[in-house]
Image (cartoon, grey):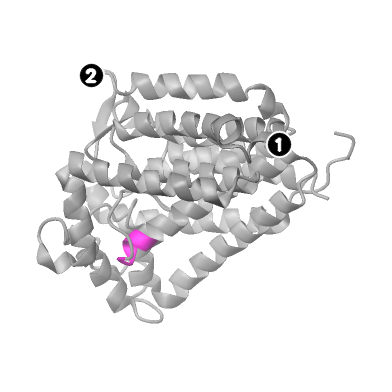
Amino acid sequence: MGKARSAPDIWMVISTLLLLTIGVIMVYSASAVLAFHEFGDRYYYLKRQLIFAVLGVVAMFFTMNVDYWVWKKYARSGLILCLVLLVIVLLPGIGVVRGGARSWLGIGSFGIQPSEFMKIGMIIFLAKLLSEQQAKVTYFAKGLLPPLGIMGLAFGLIMLQPDLGTGVVLVGASLLMIYTAGARILHLSYLGMVGLVGFIGLVIAAPYRLLRITAFLDPWQDPLGAGYQSIQSLYAIGPGGLVGLGLGMSRQKYSYLPEPQTDFIFSIIAEELGFIGGAFVLLLFTILVWRGMRTAITAPDTFGNMLAVGIIGMVAVQVIINIGVVIGMFPVTGITLPFISAGGSSLTLMLTSIGILLNISRYSR
């Protein structure tokens, strides 16, 4: 690259750090009661969140200062490593089951999710592949099938855990990159029909997914079973009103709403901070996505363009799914809200990815 680096996109930095700050505050507010009940320490989840937030910010500032095209050199080996980890986590006695999915590697309460590494690994690999073979992407067999096959392999391994939420985010970000690279709408439409058939097959293979779908359509059919999470989430959002019940004043966090510090933390935000607090969080995400797409459009080369599209697409898809689940628009999938939810590898890797995006912004035209 001949162009000298400029300052990173300041709006992206501010929105990310504000979301992270709100996340730390709300993780404590949402988890203090649960943490005291489970561990006898109301600061348990707060301390973990602070540790991973600090690690993530350090990683973000590191990747922000590493020229983004360096990652192109490690795209293939990184993808292979991620695939190996996805296989290892499935092995009995090695992979740790949490929340019904064998998706963790680690000891005790600390662990990593290989599927989180795969999201950024896939984005970097596809950015390299699509930037080098962009002229072929309009052809189905030699241009579209290779990236789809790699994406399908990763998605299949993630579904064996099973982790539908992470799998959908990976597929959503990947398809956005493929579309941006110039894939034909007709080809993607055929792919959508095949995907629909596959989705129906996944539902048939695991009846609990059908229960989640029917519960999403009418959660009050099974208010103590499949519809419980959706109902309790709405019970949290409703009383929040315009300004909320006040920070720390949530009622649903008292063992009514499952996973208040992770998947359903936006419900607690809406309950305690009201419509204004929830809207402010969504505004910050909107600013982040806007600046991310601007960075993609003004990136100096195709690799940077594809990489930026994948990273900001990953953030956007995950936010849409999480908020959609919380407000009852989508079936419950079990996915965190970026920068806000309590998390370890998910939080750290998301901040690392934003660092890469910030580095691309330093070379924007």
Residue shown at the point (76%, 46%) measured from the top left: 299
Q: Which mark is residue 135?
A: 1
The verdict on residue 325 being magenta is: yes
Quadrant of residue 345 in the image?
Answer: top left
Whether residue 9 is in magenta: the answer is no
Work out whether 17 lies above or below 106: below
Q: Is residue 141 above or below residue 138?
A: above
Which numbered tag is attached to residue 92? Answer: 2
Earlier in the chain: of badge 1 and badge 2, it is 2
Q: Secondary structure at mark 2?
A: loop
Report x, y in % for residue 262: 34, 51
Whether residue 136 sits left or right of residue 321 in the image: it is right
Q: Amino acid at mark 2?
A: Pro
Q: Quadrant of the N terminus?
A: top right
Residue drawn at (66%, 42%), measured in percent from left and top?
306
Region of the chain picked out in magenta, as a range: 324-328
- Mark 1 or 2: in front is 1
